[in-house]
Every structure is written in structure tokens, then in C-alpha cells.
Image: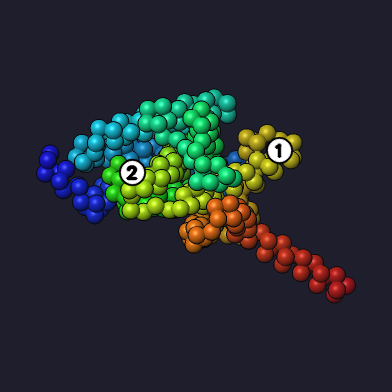
């Protein structure tokens, strides 16, 4: 056991196995799940707002969770983790299990929005209470530095629940949810690797391996499977977990990689689900509907209506997400409030460029038709 711990103390070896092991497990796991789901007819039936035309196996999140949790339990035994790290690891698994079963029930029989919010808040409270993971500082954004404890806890739980649901809402086309999660894991994981935080390296890289296995089947024509709420619930929980962990790690001066604009960087990484959710909520409320009422007003739906395929739309959004992250890193020397203004202006602009272009082309065509008459 000591030999294994010495071996996995090497970050390169740790990173290689943290990605490759869950990837290899998931390639077999998803075939088993697809067969089982088809056998039991636990398929996703197309409805009016669906973008697929035939029954497709769901429960992809179950496969991601199984490979993710098995790998994490193994790393917990062989990796050089401290006692505090093992407690954090246990709290992550417990919260993910709660959200996994919430998602499974929602996939199978449905669940009211209020009950889902309660379970999500409880999962967030478990992690915040056990590990004291919370947002404690805004780095001077709006003139705020240290946040009082009670406000810090409430704000953290609110952001957890908001981002869980935001991530759930973007799971509408093949490859999108998996790609956005992959970008988030790589972005935050890179900082964790530079700062040699073994626990966070393991969790992010293990999820990367599990997601790569899922995307292999999610993008397949023959053996396609959807992530479903079983996946979006616990992965949507892990993304803000990584963000809050990054902000806590980033605030420690003894670390190698410290970003002066940690808040802006985290906002850029999670920009797409945040923007898409705020956008559809505003549209629904302005139309006198419940913000939780499903529709086809998401950005990915609009991209499909412009003639893009699933892969093209997912690729466009993923590339745009990466562009926003690069911009956030490039403006880190500016005043934090100016950075916030730039990034909040840039996010809707770049994600909605296709709609602006199409609208302008439509106006030109209409003008030409009027001239011809």
C-alpha cells in the first residue's frame, strides 16, 4: 500500500490513471446500461419539445456515477490523501448519491420543482456543513471582500441549487452537457494540478474520464444514450463544488497558481448555463409562465432552428465557452469591477452572435424584396 501511495504521489502518473481507469470502465458500463434500459423499456419518449425523433435510452448519468464513484473509492485507498481529504471525499459521494437518486426518480416518474430544490439544498448543506466549503470573499467586486458567515453559507447554497438546475436545463442536445462539464473540469482541474491539490485533481480528472466515456455513446448513432436528470443533478452539483474549491484554493497565497480575478474566471467557466438559464427564465416570466415551465427557447434550440446539427451546435457553444474563459484570463490586470462589466457584456454577445447575424441577414433580404417591388 505504501508503494502505491508513493507511486500515485507523482502527479503525472496520478493524472494518467485518474482519467484512463474510469474511461475504460465506462466504455463497458454504458453498453451494459444501454442493454438494460432497452430491456426494461426505460426509454426517453419524444414529446413536442424534444429534439430527437425516436425512443432513446436515458440513465446515462447512472453510468457516469458508477464509474466516477468506483474510481474515487479506489483512489481514496491508494492515493496519498490526508484525513481531511477523505472526509471531503466522503461528503462529495454522499451528496452525489442523494442527487443521483433524485435524478433517477425525476427521470422515471417526475418530481415537483419545490421538492427538487429542497433535496438539492440539503445536498449542498451537507457539503457546506461538513467541509466548510463556501464563498467567503468577492475579491473586491462591488467593493466587497470578506462576507459574513451566515450570508456566506446562504449564498453558497443558493448558488449550488441555481447551478444544479442551470446545468440540468442545458441538457437538450447530444454532446452539450457533457462538453460544458468537460470544459469546466479541465479549467478548474488545471489550477488544481498547478497547486498540487491531490483530492481536487483526483475528483476533476476522474470526472473527465467518466465524461469522455459518456460522450463516446452520447454522440453515437448506434448506441446513443442520454445523460438524463440522473446525471445532470450530480454533475451540476460538482461544477459549483469545483468553482468554490477553486476560489478557496486561489485565495491561499502559498500556492503556485493564484489568479487575481478568481471570481471572474469562475463566472467565465460557468457562463453558458448561467446565461441560458437567466435568459429562458426572463422569457418565461415575461410571457406570464412559470420559470420552471419547459419550452424550446434555450440557446441550443435556437441554434438547431438555424439549421445547425447537434454536433455543430454543441461545438459552437463549447468553443464560445473556451473563448470567454480566454478573455477572462487576458483581462486579469484590469480593475475587478471593470472586468465584471466586460465579461457580463461579452457573455451574451458572443453566445448570441448567430441570432444577431441571422436577424441582420433577414432584414437585408426584406429590404431587397421591398426594393424589387
Give SS at disc 2. Answer: helix
Q: Is residue 82 visible?
A: yes
Left or right: where does residue 270 sit relative to residue 194?
A: right
Q: Answer few, some or many: residues within 10 Å of disc 2's Cα (few below 14, many 20 plus, some between 14 and 19).
A: many
Q: Closest to the observer: 220 or 157?
A: 157
Residue placed at 66% from the left, 59% from the top? 355
Left or right: where does residue 169 sit relative to residue 218?
A: right
Percent x, y for residue 231? 44, 39
Residue placed at 47% from the left, 37% from the top? 136
Q: Answer few, some or many: residues within 10 Å of disc 1's Cα (few below 14, many 20 plus, some between 14 and 19).
A: few
Return the residue found at the far bottom.
Answer: 372
Is there CB contact under 8 Å for labels 2 and 1? no
Residue placed at 62% from the left, 43% from the top? 278
Task: Count all numbered tags in the image, as a single digit.
Answer: 2
Circle 1 sits on which residue?
285
Q: Closest to the observer: 22 or 321?
A: 321
**250 above or below 234?**
below
Query: In 3D space, how far apart are the residues under numbered discs 2 and 1 (Cα atoms)?
Result: 38 Å
Q: Is residue 174 visible?
A: no
Give SS at disc 1. Answer: helix
Quarter of the rendering containing residue 25: top left
Circle 2 sits on which residue?
200
Percent x, y for residue 211? 38, 47
Q: Can you tell which mark lies on residue 216?
A: none
Amino acid at each position: 500500500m505504501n508503494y502505491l501511495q508513493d507511486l500515485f504521489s507523482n502527479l503525472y502518473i496520478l493524472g494518467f490513471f485518474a482519467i484512463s481507469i474510469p474511461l475504460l470502465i465506462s466504455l463497458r458500463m454504458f453498453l451494459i446500461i444501454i442493454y438494460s434500459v432497452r430491456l426494461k423499456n426505460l426509454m426517453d419518449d419524444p414529446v413536442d419539445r424534444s429534439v430527437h425523433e425516436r425512443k432513446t435510452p436515458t440513465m446515462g448519468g447512472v453510468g457516469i456515477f458508477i464509474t466516477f464513484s468506483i474510481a474515487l473509492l479506489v483512489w481514496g485507498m491508494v492515493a496519498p490523501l490526508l484525513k481531511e481529504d477523505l472526509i471531503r471525499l466522503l461528503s462529495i459521494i454522499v451528496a452525489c448519491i442523494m442527487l443521483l437518486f433524485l435524478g433517477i426518480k425525476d427521470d422515471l416518474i417526475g418530481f415537483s420543482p419545490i421538492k427538487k430544490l429542497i433535496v438539492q439544498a440539503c445536498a449542498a448543506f451537507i457539503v457546506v456543513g461538513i467541509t466548510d466549503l463556501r464563498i467567503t470573499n468577492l475579491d473586491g467586486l462591488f467593493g466587497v471582500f470578506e462576507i459574513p458567515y451566515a450570508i456566506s453559507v446562504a449564498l453558497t447554497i443558493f448558488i449550488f441549487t441555481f447551478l444544479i438546475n442551470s446545468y440540468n436545463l442545458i441538457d437538450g442536445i447530444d454532446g452539450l452537457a457533457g462538453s460544458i462539464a468537460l470544459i469546466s473540469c479541465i479549467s478548474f482541474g488545471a489550477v488544481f494540478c498547478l497547486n498540487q491539490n491531490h483530492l481536487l485533481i483526483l475528483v476533476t480528472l476522474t470526472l473527465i474520464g467518466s465524461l469522455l466515456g459518456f460522450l463516446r455513446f452520447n454522440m453515437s448513432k448506434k448506441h446513443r444514450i442520454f445523460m438524463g436528470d440522473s446525471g445532470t443533478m450530480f454533475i451540476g452539483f460538482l461544477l459549483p463544488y469545483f468553482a468554490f474549491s477553486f476560489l478557496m484554493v486561489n485565495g491561499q497565497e502559498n500556492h503556485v497558481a493564484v489568479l487575481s480575478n478568481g471570481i471572474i474566471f469562475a463566472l467565465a467557466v460557468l457562463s453558458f448555463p448561467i446565461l441560458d438559464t437567466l435568459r429562458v427564465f426572463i422569457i418565461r416570466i415575461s410571457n406570464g409562465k412559470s420559470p420552471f415551465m419547459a419550452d424550446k427557447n434555450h440557446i441550443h434550440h435556437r441554434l438547431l432552428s438555424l439549421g445547425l446539427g447537434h454536433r455543430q451546435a454543441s461545438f459552437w457553444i463549447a468553443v464560445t465557452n473556451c473563448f470567454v474563459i480566454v478573455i477572462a484570463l487576458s483581462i486579469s490586470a484590469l480593475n475587478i469591477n471593470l472586468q465584471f462589466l466586460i465579461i457580463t457584456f461579452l457573455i451574451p454577445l458572443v453566445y448570441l452572435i448567430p441570432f444577431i447575424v441571422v436577424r441582420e441577414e433577414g432584414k437585408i433580404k426584406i429590404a431587397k424584396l421591398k426594393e424589387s417591388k
